[in-house]
Image (spheres, coloured by chain):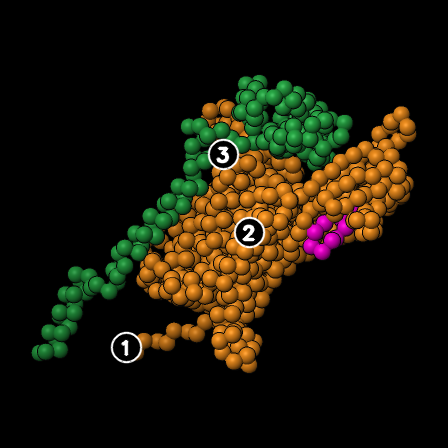
Amino acid sequence: MAEFGAFALILGLALSIAQLGLSAGARVRRSTVLAAAGEGAAFAAFLATAVAFGLLMHAFVVSDFSVANVAANSHTEKPLLYKVAGTWGSHEGSMLLWDFALTAYGAAMALFGRNLPRGLKATAVAVQGGLGSVFLAYTVFASNPFVRLVNPPVEGRSLNPLLQDPALAVHPPFLYSGYVGMSVVFSLAVAALIEGRVDAAWARWVRPWALAAWSLLTIGITLGSFWAYYELGWGGWWFWDPVENASFMPWLVATALLHSAVVTEKRGALPGWTVFLGLAAFTFSMLGAFLVRSGVLTSVHAFAVDPKRGVLLLIILGVTAGLGFALFAWRAPGLNQGGVFAPVSRESALVLNNILLAAATATVLLGTLYPLIREAMTGEAISVGPPYFNLTFMPLMAALALLLPTGPLLAWKRGDALGVSQRLWIAALVALAAGLAVYAMEDPRKAFGALGLALGAWLIAGAIAELVERTRAFRAPALESWRRLVSLPRGAWGMTLAHLGLGVFVLGATFETTWRAEAAETLPIGGALNVGAYHLVLKDVGPIEGKNYDAERAIVAATRDGHPVCVGEPERRLYLAGGQTTSEVAICNRGFSHLYIVLGERRDSASGPVWLIRAYWNPLASLIFLGPVIMALGGAISLSDRRLRIGVPRRREQPA
Amino acid sequence: MRVRASLAALAGVLCIAAASDPSERLPNPAQEARARTIFKDVRCLVCQNESIDDSQAELAHDLRQIVRQQVKAGKSDVEIKQFLTDRYGQFVLLRPSFDAGNLALWAGPFLVVGLGVVLLLGRLRNRQPEDELSEAERARLQRLSQDGRT
């Protein structure tokens, strides 16, 4: 079967090259026949790659250890979900997933791009074919997942047990469809530059792809973060680790792109900048793919590190992005500037949003790459860790959050600052009151926490104020407001939800980082420790047997003021295949807050065995993950907006 | 090679929240809290990308001991960090120092903001360029209106 997979992969490569050639030919000769053939090749390339991907998955499911990749990353005793997830658990498999997504987007563009102008579409399909050819060639020649072993082992080496987790198993498909979704935006940007026209219609074509990719990326990052939170066992959820940063940079750029594309769509302004962001989004996706695999950065979760392939990926990145930006430098000066706007206007607010997001991206990029650059230039090694990001990224984001609620309330072209402040003073008051109340009541007293909380409340209240404004609630009759509410375009709902979600996230992140409590003790059976307002008693520790691991499981009873609250059962697992231990934490949900319990190692004391028990009180921790889910939901709702489905009214021919 | 790298990564991951281990703690809670704050800024040199607050590596344990002893001896945060950088170089600090070599790192993001604002202001200043006719357009208009007259 593996030979068929390899064959399908090579077929996919050939078809992608055909897609590039045919569609480019279609553009040059303005031939509809060639264009249709190019689109057909895009479909066929997708099918071939899908077959290759399916066959690799099959090899994992049936544990075909004659395939080197399966032998290195799977095990017969592994649960089915993780056998399937093993398909993308390695360098080779994840590149195949990347190719699969890339050709799938190419086929989707051919299918859904019916209302694109012919020339633009042919060029974009050709560019997408070019991207597909490059990455498929890389997979076929440098990272083929179908390589056979001459002497297949009886048992595989298994997947890293830390990765054997539902959230992590499904997070790469989300992440990759987000990363690779930016390729469509890249192709459309290149096509627009070649055609020499970037206008409102173009921005509207770009929007659904950018939205879909952004929403998927949001979910992917959140799943990864959630996994880190409960699997790594110390309750952290973001470490400013290079690999996290690699996924965060495309997200920041895509967020900026979504906002600047609005300006281009509604007002025809900033076309050059929007195209630039379109190119940058996929460039950062490729940079991420390179950073994670090349081993140039030390990271807790850099995986499948191989410097030789890293160089190849760097060349692909350099050539692809280089061509894109060279084209930009050549063609962008000829682009129209678009509509004019006053200093106080929605355009200005969105430009400020973009400036801050660009600066935030620069922060993450510098923080990730500066140690490398400095070491290469001066030979002196430095570290850039969380304290750097707290001092640079946080103020930028605080400024962005402060500005955010005003944007949607400002009018296009010329806004009314006084009117906006009239509509937002209640939200401002709510935020201020929330901040002050928390500053006064929460123990220990922390100004930064209160500030973060006020910002979160400001975002949420601002999103609601915007909804009130749109529906004229409390001013118009209730029925009228209701009618307005239900007839709001989905795009508006999407925006409100996304902004609300950000506020929810800020609340959770602020509370969790400011007021988390930690306790750790070595306890005998019957021993107790206190964390936050909770009293924890270690009731029992016993052995259990899993499918592919042995474990110790503790039973920890939590009480508050003498009332039983919950019983946590944290585990410490020993995986038989690789001999690694992992900890399964127990999380008690208390509203949106978490009581987080970890079973540590067993020690011997004079009076018998004791266990290291760590417990954390993570206030409002659920909101950290709920917020981004609301944001992604906003993206999905916006994606279902009528104006994106129906398409752009065609320009009427000017009478001669 | 790859296996070793991933094992190292794994070992790194498993070194978790070691600093809270009760066997290491200082008896004075205020001093312990100060030590924990310092730990978060100090890199575990042999680990993948962790502070000594998180790492269970041998070296992280030793570094924590050094920091705790110095906190106990009443040294200031600055003195402790100076001691560590004298011994291990800048690499040991997770917060890069504010010096000339790191200028681009610290100033970069704010430079982007400055540049963006300058560009925005420039855009806002010359606001109505397309309302004005270019020289060629003016000539053409002239010609057209004359054509109409004859």
The label nearer to you, 2 versus 3, is: 2
Where residue B100 appears, as percent x and y from the top left, is 42, 28
Bounds of the magenta segment: A586-594
Residue at the outermost front position: A440
Q: Label the green chain with its letter.
A: B
Residue at x 32%, y 76% (from the top left corner): A654
Task: Determine which residue is flagged by label 3.
Answer: A370
Q: Which mark is residue A436?
A: 2
Secondary-structure class at tag 2: helix
Q: Amino acid at mark 2?
A: Leu
Secondary-structure class at tag 1: loop
Near-viewer residue (A494 or A375): A494
Q: Amino acid at mark 1?
A: Ala
Is residue A519 shown left or right of residue A400? Answer: right
Task: Determine which residue is flagged by label 1.
Answer: A656
- In the figure, the shade used to draw chain A is orange
